[in-house]
Amino acid sequence: MHCKIEATTANPIHRLREEGWCIVEGVIPEAECEKIRQGIYDVAKANRKNYAIEGLTFLPAFINYNQSYAKYIADPNVLDIVKGIFGPHPRVSYTSALINEPGNKRGAWHADWPFNQQKAGHIPSPYPLDVIFHLTTLWMISPFTIENGGTLIIPKSHLKPTNPTCKPEEDWTQPLDGEMNATGPSGSVLILDSRMWHATAKNSSDTPRVGLAIRYAPWWLNLDILMPGSEERKMMVDKPGLSENEVPRLKHEVYNNLTKETKPLFHHWLHTR
């Protein structure tokens, strides 16, 4: 059954811990979303990664290509929640464009890094502690609706000790009990515990659903395995020939043009190791 999840800002940290998700509306003004939507779409399409699933336009390290949304990454409505989970020194781990094209295929259920068991840098399942290690935020540059493929989630699935990536041989594209579409007006942000089971939803409309995935990590979570050229990546990914997400370093000219509030979230991506 596909149900609409009502947006909520009441006790978002409590809701994240109990339900695994919350939605914050109005982070980017809707009029601003209208201005930046086409630019985000055009840049993502022009640089799309070919390994994305059919009908999905995906571009990692999107901050290097387009910064029209960058000042909002440190918006207090989002960052206060992140700091409430991780403390005063969170970092951004990913900035990715995620666009559901009309007629795209439904994706497989999964949990995000570092809980995806098919990636080299994962926390082994079963997870020993109920601790939020990583937050996935999905920014609704287009309105997210049931029709256009608002992300599918299963509330409270973050409390499970494992996720579907442990059994990739099974067909995890089928509907599951309790699944819902996360929906909201443009400018809203869906915040997920990265352990949450979620999936790409089918876009049955005739227009692309434009979104951004911006993920936040605590200061103590080692992100170096994601960075091309790092010693961790050479040892854990390149040498054994395993698979892992890739987040290229931030360009210095991009960093220099970020706001003073946003820069602390990205400084680690400038390091050369």
Image (cartoon, grey):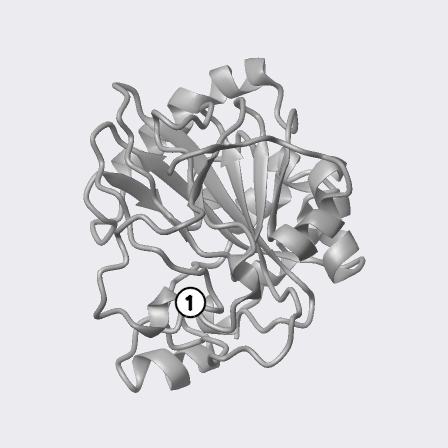
Q: Is residue 194 left or right of residue 74?
A: left
Question: What residue appears at the point 67 percent right and 33 percent down from the top-left corner?
Answer: 8
Which is nearer the eye, 253 or 195? Answer: 195
Question: What residue appears at the point 39 percent right and 83 percent down from the top-left corner?
Answer: 236
Question: Vertically, is 270 above or below 49?
Answer: below
Q: Is residue 92 left or right of residue 41?
A: right
Question: Vertically, is 266 above or below 228?
Answer: above
Q: Quarter of the image holding residue 180?
A: top left
Which is nearer the eye, 225 or 168? Answer: 168
Residue 263 x %, y % = 68, 48
Residue 105 x %, y % = 21, 41
Give the residue type that dot 1 points to: Asn
Question: What residue appears at the point 27 percent right and 41 percent down from the top-left corner?
Answer: 56
Residue 79 x %, y % = 72, 45
Question: What residue appears at the point 25 percent right and 19 percent down from the top-left corner?
Answer: 206
Number of residues whose C-alpha sits closer than 10 Å to that of mark 1, classed few (under 14), some (14–19) or many (20 or more): many
Quadrant housing the N terminus: top left
| Residue on which disc 1 sits | 163
